[in-house]
Image (cartoon, rainbow, N blue to C red):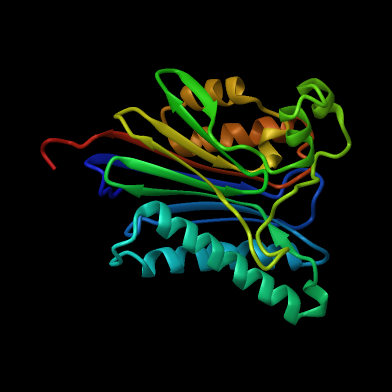
Amino acid sequence: MESQTGLKLEVAALTDVGCKRTNNEDNLGYDLTAQLFVVCDGMGGMAAGEVASSTAVGTLLRAFSESTASSATIEERLYSAITQANHEVCALSQANEEMRGMGTTLVAAGLDGRKIVIGNVGDSRAYFLRDGGCVQITLDHSYLAEQVRNGVMTADDAGASPLQSLITRAIGTAETVEPDLFSAALEPGDMVLLTTDGLTRYADAELIGQLVLTHTDLQEACQALINTAKEQGAVDNVTCLLLRFSEEDSAA
């Protein structure tokens, strides 16, 4: 509930193994002091996906927190922390035969005053909710999303394709990675959702907005999102992290 934004901050997060998987390769984390929030969706054989996502979350939070006293901008700090997470996962992958080829998506939100900066690699997404509307902030680094953006395929065709999990950029699969960064000025009432494709293959921005905005309790909103995916079969793990910003209590 702490905030350095001049706004009251509420946070809720839930992760679920889904209906088909036996293990959860998603990971999430946040540091209220450093004002950083992250969701990752790991991939790789055996337990490698879990290792990749947990390593990325831990490295990102540590690197970002360690840069708090630096003179770098929040964009530079987040970019650097993401590249450090990539280096750590890549090094683990190369050093362990059973983890070779593992990787993870990453979507993170960092706060600097009333400014929020979103960074992403892969197809885990950030959504921004304001005035009853919900829009996707991030661009998926996936084969299908790129086909749609290039006009090669329609969104409906992409939704029916068996290539849902084919991503074109990930943490840990190459020695370098290029995250996308997005920023926005926060206002009271704004909400941000960080989530994995375990949800977004079943819910578009409009449905996400409806589900979140009909629950005043953030934890219940996260559960409602997960339930929606599970009601439709949830073939993947499902993770949701919600942030809500409101005016600080004047008596505080």
Q: Position of residue 126 (x, y in %)?
A: 54, 38
Residue at 34 percent across and 27 percent down: it is 189
Q: Position of residue 67 (x, y in %)?
A: 36, 67
The image shows residue 149 at horizontal and vertical percentages of 71, 29
Q: Is residue 30 visible?
A: no
Q: Is residue 87 left or right of residue 103?
A: left
Front-lying residue, 74 or 3: 74
Name the image quarter holding the C terminus. Answer: top left
Residue sitting at x 63%, y 44%? 124
| Frontmost residue, 53 versus 226 | 53
Can residue 33 be seen?
yes
Q: Does residue 38 appear to the left or right of 45 in the view shown?
A: left
**Residue 22, above or below 158:** below
Q: Residue furthest left?
A: 251
**Residue extending furthest bottom?**
95
Q: Nearer the viewer, residue 50 or 217?
A: 50
Report which quarter residue 117 is drawn in. Answer: top left
Residue sitting at 34 percent across and 55 percent down?
73
Left-right relation of 121 to 212: right
User: In the picture provided, is 151 more to the left or to the right than 86?
Assistant: right
Q: What residue sits 55% from the left and 63% below the top?
A: 83
- Which x, y percent locates residue 193? 51, 37
